[in-house]
Image (cartoon, rainbow, N blue to C red):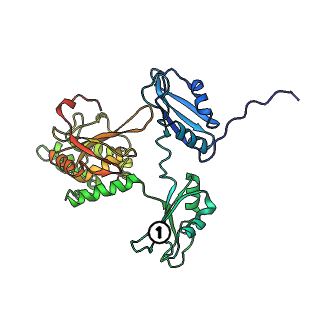
Amino acid sequence: MSGLNPGPAVPMKDHDAIKLFVGQIPRGLDEQDLKPLFEEFGRIYELTVLKDRLTGLHKGCAFLTYCARDSALKAQSALHEQKTLPGMNRPIQVKPAASEGRGEDRKLFVGMLGKQQGEEDVRRLFQPFGHIEECTVLRSPDGTSKGCAFVKFGSQGEAQAAIQSLHGSRTMAGASSSLVVKLADTDRERALRRMQQMAGQLGALQPAPLPLGACGAYTTAVSAWPGGRGRAAAHLHCGPCAPLSPAQSPGVADPLQQAYAGMHHYAAAYPSAYAPVSTTFPQQPSGLPQQQREGPEGCNLFIYHLPQEFGDAELIQTFLPFGAVVSAKVFVDRATNQSKCFGFVSFDNPTSAQTAIQAMNGFQIGMKRLKVQLKRPKDANRPY
């Protein structure tokens, strides 16, 4: 026997541990300085101060993960906006990181229940898979069950286990088909549906799509017209995206490349519609502009009070019903990768921009209302 003492045990975290974002930290404090503050709530699995990749300077925030979920909840309850650290003007922020805590990956929609089943029956069905935080059977105004429910588990793993075991596994008494168990719609998805329904009611309907296979022939034919170089993209409709490639871009060699530029821009948001693009154009043609593009004057909008969950794809989907979107961008904090809750959208014509303002300015999502306004001339030099 060597007699060597074993090293310290490597900390292990629970499967439902929460990653916390910690803000308003003095820039002079590193991980070792911060540990005493957080260790009183439980054993720490990981604590990382965020630093600028180029300069190495402290960004005044950190990510914190406890070994136990309960420790994270205690720390959040005791510290979030409750204590101001030395040298800071605002209290410390302790809350689930952007990818945590929203419950979107733990809340299930359960359909095709029997009309006679209540909350207790649903709980008994899902109890074997883990801790149930919420269970609600949806009911009509007269109190009768709608045959569906929402169930929220304590962790993503528990929710996924329930889906894998129960979805389609049986037909409940009185139901017309097998049990449906899936992740519930997120607040983001519901907001998108509401916005798009509103756009449709205002008559801002999308143009009829042109089959993707016809794009090459279409652009070739249009390019033969006098001045056809700019028109090909302006008239091209592919899938759900309306006119894809916007105002003429310097450096784009021909109409087909213009069309491809638009498809490439939206492919992430609409993979099913643009799957063939990757085989037809395996690489993006050289010369396409990489910077954020803008539309003509009077076509560029600022959007404030966006939901925290919205990304570029959701912003595009929201404003596509009003016309051809040149570009869309949600601004993100580089240190935390969390949305700053504002962005901008550019159309290829002022009519679409005005329609979007009329429809979406003041549109309520949760406790906030969207603010949609034209980009002002003094914003011309604002970096994107």
Classify residue 203 by image quadrant.
Answer: bottom left
Q: Nearer the viewer, residue 223 or 291?
A: 291
Whether residue 333 sits left or right of residue 355 in the image: it is right
Question: Circle 1 sits in a helix, a strand or a loop, which is it?
Answer: strand
Q: Position of residue 43 (x, y in %)?
A: 65, 36
Q: Quadrant of the C terminus?
A: top left
Determine the residue positioned at 52% across, 54% down.
Answer: 106
Q: Is residue 321 above or below residue 39?
A: below
Q: Nearer the viewer, residue 326 or 3?
A: 3
Whether residue 165 sits left or right of residue 82 in the image: it is right
Q: Position of residue 236 (x, y in %)?
A: 22, 51
Q: Amino acid at mark 1?
A: Cys
Whether residue 47 sits left or right of residue 12 in the image: it is left
View extreme (right): residue: 1
Q: Position of residue 231 (x, y in %)?
A: 16, 46
Q: Quadrant of the N terminus?
A: top right
Q: Nearer the viewer, residue 361 or 253?
A: 361
Determine the residue positioned at 21% across, 42% down.
Answer: 373
Count residues near mark 1 (Cα–Cα under 10 Å), then give few for <14, some for 14-19, many for 20+.
Answer: many
Q: Is residue 94 above or below residue 168?
A: above
Q: Circle 1 is placed at which residue position?
A: 148
Report how many numbered discs are placed on residues in the image.
Answer: 1
View extreme (front): residue: 82
Q: Position of residue 237 (x, y in %)?
A: 24, 53
* Residue 232 seen in the figure: no
* Residue 97 seen in the figure: yes
Q: Is residue 221 above or below residue 293?
A: below
Whether residue 165 sits left or right of residue 380 in the image: it is right
Classify residue 371 by image quadrant.
Answer: top left
View extreme (left): residue: 226
Determine the residue positioned at 28% across, 56% down.
Answer: 196
